[in-house]
Image (spheres, rainbow, N blue to C red):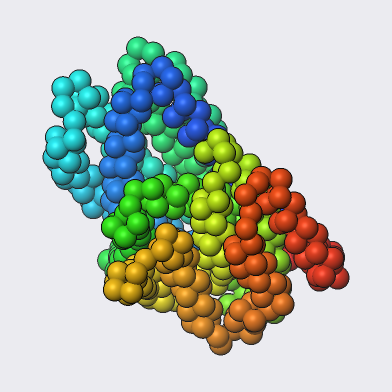
Amino acid sequence: MEKLFHKPGKILQRISKNTFWIILLNIVIAFSQLIILSFINKKLGKEILGVWSLVMAATTIGQISAFGFSNGLVRYLPEYFIKKEFEKAEKMVATINVANFLFSLPFIFLLYFPMMLYANHLLKGEQLIMFHSAIIWNLVALFINNLFSAYSFIFDALQKYYIRSIIQIAGWILFVIISFCLMPTMQLTGVAIANVFQAVLQLVVAIVIIRQMKVFKRKRLLGFDKQVFKLIFSVGTKYQSISVLVIFFDPVIKFFITKTIGLSGTANYELANKIVSQGRNLLVNSNQVIIPKVVAHTTSNTLDPYFEKIIDRNLYLSIIIGLATLILSPVAILFFSGHFDRVLFQSIIIINIGVVSNMITSIHYFTCMGIDKLNNLVILHFLYPLIAIICSFILLKIGVHSLTAIAIPSFSILVGSIYNSIVLSEIRGACKWIWSNAFIYFIAVSLIVLFIPTYSFIYSIGLFFTFTIVFVFLFRAKLMSLLKNTPA
């Protein structure tokens, strides 16, 4: 076990593998969800798909049942392993497992009643019966996933994200296969049962691998330590606050957009956000591998040079993804609308500005996790809806245009990204992206195309493609340098 953290160079060699498998996992998840939704829609009908959507929405809210207990593992376990404090690491995992039984299980049981009350107001007859059956199985899967999360964070802390990703990919494949087998006879209940099989597979395989790796002395990681519980409860409360605020932001935005410009504006925001967020999700999820590295560099007082390297790479990668999104956006508009929708095209450009700034500062976000600045992340997620609410009230007073309403969430995210950088101003290079030539170029290009009259797919694609080629030409030296010296 001690060899895992004996040579930092070996960790660096594993990063590319970790990143590849995390990206592949996100692709598998996206395709699996699309396949299941498509199958439900074709085989069971749109109304039943609506029932499943309500089941998944209720289950998503149920994720707060984890209380954020397991999240602290990725922060503290790397430090324990580096310092060879394996007993502390063992106590923390054992305490979290017991805490899941003591707190998560009863909370999930209690959640069942408001979920059914919610369903009773929207469904009746056979639809309500389907919801009831599916939600029970989904809640079982939710609890098993809470247990699995503790073991998944052990892999993350060991810089073995690829093992966790492979386990989850296997789980998603099993979920799709069992759903196909059970859905014709059991309908939504079959899909929910497939969810349970997926959760059980992931938990069992993770436990077996952890035992084979001989990370801990105990075979059964069950126990309770008061001091450890106080620590994970304190950290968990902050993660829980972040989760609640994340859930809160989207409904707030949609409420004000609907209130100010109507449902068509909400539809444009939803489609634009979906189109833009795909590239963002891949990059941000792959960037989470830096958390244990941040802990290691903080311990060895080498965080500044490490941060400077990764922020440069992330800045240019974020902008390239942002430009690629704009090039491909007309194709996405054609897929969703069947014709060129200029307002939707402009909405994508506006939202993309905020999303690119969010991608750039995802490094800052995960660094905050690694250096115990969770309070700042709570403030950050509180700022998002606060800025949106203030801006919306101002617009209601002075008059609202469809694009200004959609610009509110993008502006909120941009301001939040700047705040997140200022929080880390003691780290060298934390704020330099704001006035970097690459980011200024991206903003300028976005604003130019936003106000240029564009009414055709070919013209829009060609315009952004040209600006992307110019970007690569202008910054070719920096891009080549980053390619030759890709950091962990």
- Observer-nearest of 180 and 72: 180
User: Residue 462, image x and y in percent?
Assistant: 75, 51
* Residue 21 image point, x, y percent: 64, 45
Q: Residue at x 40, y 52 (%)?
A: 265
Image quadrant occupied by the N terminus? bottom right
Task: Depth check: give the residue in front, 380 or 96.
Answer: 380
Q: Is residue 201 above or below residue 114?
A: above
Left or right side of 30 for 468: right
- Relative to residue 347, is residue 103 drawn left or right? left
* Number of numbered discs visible in the structure rendering: 0
Residue 381 x %, y %: 38, 68
- Give residue 66's position: percent from left, percent from top: 32, 52
Residue 25 appears in the figure: no
**Relative height, residue 166 to residue 475 (above, below):** above
Residue at (64%, 62%) from the top-left corner? 452
| Quadrant in the picture for residue 399 | bottom left
The quarter of the rendered structure image containing the C terminus is: bottom right
